[in-house]
Amino acid sequence: MTSKGSEDKTARGGLPPMPETVLLARPAIKIDWKRIAFMFLGIALFLAIYFAPGFSDAIDPGGKHFPLSPQGKASLALFALAGTWWVFEVVPIGVTSILIGVVQALFLIRKPADAFKDFMDPSVWFILGSLVIGMVFTKTGLTKRMAYKMLAIVGEKTSMILLGCFIMTVILTHIMAHTAVAATVFPLFMAINSLYEESEKPTRFGKNLFMGMAFVAGAGSIITLLGAARGAVAIGFFNQMADKEIGFFELTYYMFPVGWLMMFLIWGLMMLFYPPEKKTIPGLRERVKVLYSRLGPLSKNEILVLVIVFSAIAILALKSLFPRVELFKNLDKSGIILAATVIFFALKILKLEDLEELPLNIILLFGGAMSIGFCLWQTGAAEWMAVKFIVMFQTAPWFVFVLAITFFVMLLTNFIMNVAAIAITLPVALVLAKYLGVAQEVIFFSSLVAAGMPFLLLVGAAPNAIAYGSGQFTSGEFFKAGIIPSILLMVVVALFIWIVWPLMGMPVTAPLAP
């Protein structure tokens, strides 16, 4: 006799009976309320400023009025929105950059042709060329060769490895633009990081290495005119508005101690806040010697890359040293570095798949930074902000006035091109200095120091964006990490204004203008 259970099994091929109901567990949907809150905070700031009543005119000491147009007010609203979304990374940073162009077009802040043209600005192309140089160093094996050689010298202590990386970065900024330096050392530092931690997960060592690299690249870039374009622009303004000129070696004389002091202080701060998980990497020196020996002699492609890159660097250096020589005057820095990019592909050192691996997110980030910077500039919002802020200190003691200028440039350069921050602030500050008994030289040098070190936002400088590509930190972590170095920068500038630069022979006060 067969039971009912046996019959069911037979009917289903010997399988046990199916339950009457099957409950499928649904995956829990996790809502990121923090992200949503900051997304709406940015939108709320935009709407609050955009629909606010018109702001009062800014008035300089000479009585000139600087009204804020509706487009200028709208650009300030966009400035607040983009800054909030960038810091808290509510969407990918490149997408926030696209939003900058979209908002300008939809809200008629600027013509769409102008808003989106900035994404193709020569400076953005310079970033692309710099990233290609980093890529070609990695592909040919030059980065590993450089990394192993440096690690064999500095040894196994992680603190010394980080110091060695930072010193190398600063030395390179003496002879080449900090953007190109960051792109060059980035793959090298990626190779070093892989020796510390084989997985790609973020570590304190990785945060220290890459955020520190961005910070010290800025510190080193102030030392010579070759470190960044902002120095030449600032000298141009100074030479036009003052009755004296500042030369290449005079700039280096005053900037050298500031840049190197900041480098060592940044290293100390990063070791304090992001101490590596491992104090040493046992056996590293012997390991890298073996790895270096396996690379063998320089390959043909490695030699070609070195020749091409150093030729481009030499031309860029000559252009900075001799800007008025006819041969170099009309050469564009982006054209020079992109010529190297074309040669890499022409010689088949790089291929199509390499082009497709370029980090579009970072390129878009810098394009958005250019767009918001030009938006603030062309609508008059940046000049309005500069005059509004600076005249607040027109009756302050000279020391307070100089620090106020420095602080404003430091904040502004985190959002717009440092060249633009200098171009907006310096002319107003140099005019006002005459009425406060402040020497124009100290305004020039303190502003230039601050313009070189945007430690808060990724969009402040190309090395910040390049370092972000490591995946070791978020934009929010970068912002938090940059607060203390920014405060330290102000302390260092105060020290140099009050004590060091006067001892070096820099005038800090001047007779009052009649």
Image: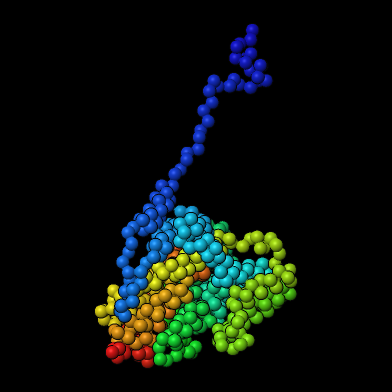
User: As rendered, which of 214 and 77 lies closer to the eye?
Assistant: 77
Residue 391: image x %, image y %? 30, 75
Instruction: Give the left or right position of residue 246, taking residue 510 as reference.
Output: right
Residue 286 appears in view: no
Question: To which quarter of the image does residue 268 belong?
Answer: bottom left
User: As rendered, which of 62 and 88 lies closer to the eye?
Assistant: 62
- Against 328, residue 28 (above or below) is above
Residue 267: image x %, image y %? 44, 73
- Against 216, residue 326 (above or below) is below
User: As rendered, which of 495 and 293 lies closer to the eye?
Assistant: 495
Render colour scheme: rainbow
Question: To which quarter of the image does residue 42 belong?
Answer: bottom left
Residue 498: image x %, image y %? 32, 84
Residue at the (52%, 65%) spot, across then down = 114
Residue at the (36%, 80%) spot, across then down = 429
Residue 445: image x %, image y %? 40, 83
Residue 106 appears in view: yes
Instruction: Give the left or right position of residue 190, taking residue 223 as reference.
Output: right
Q: Quadrant of the N terminus?
A: top right
Question: To which quarter of the image does residue 452 belong?
Answer: bottom left
Residue at the (46%, 43%) spot, across then down = 30
Q: Quadrant of the C terminus?
A: bottom left
Residue at the (54%, 20%) spot, across then down = 20
Instruction: Give the left or right position of residue 450, taking residue 511 as reference.
Output: right
User: As rendered, which of 277 and 70 lies closer to the eye?
Assistant: 70
- Against 320, residue 191 (above or below) is above
| Numbered label tally | 0
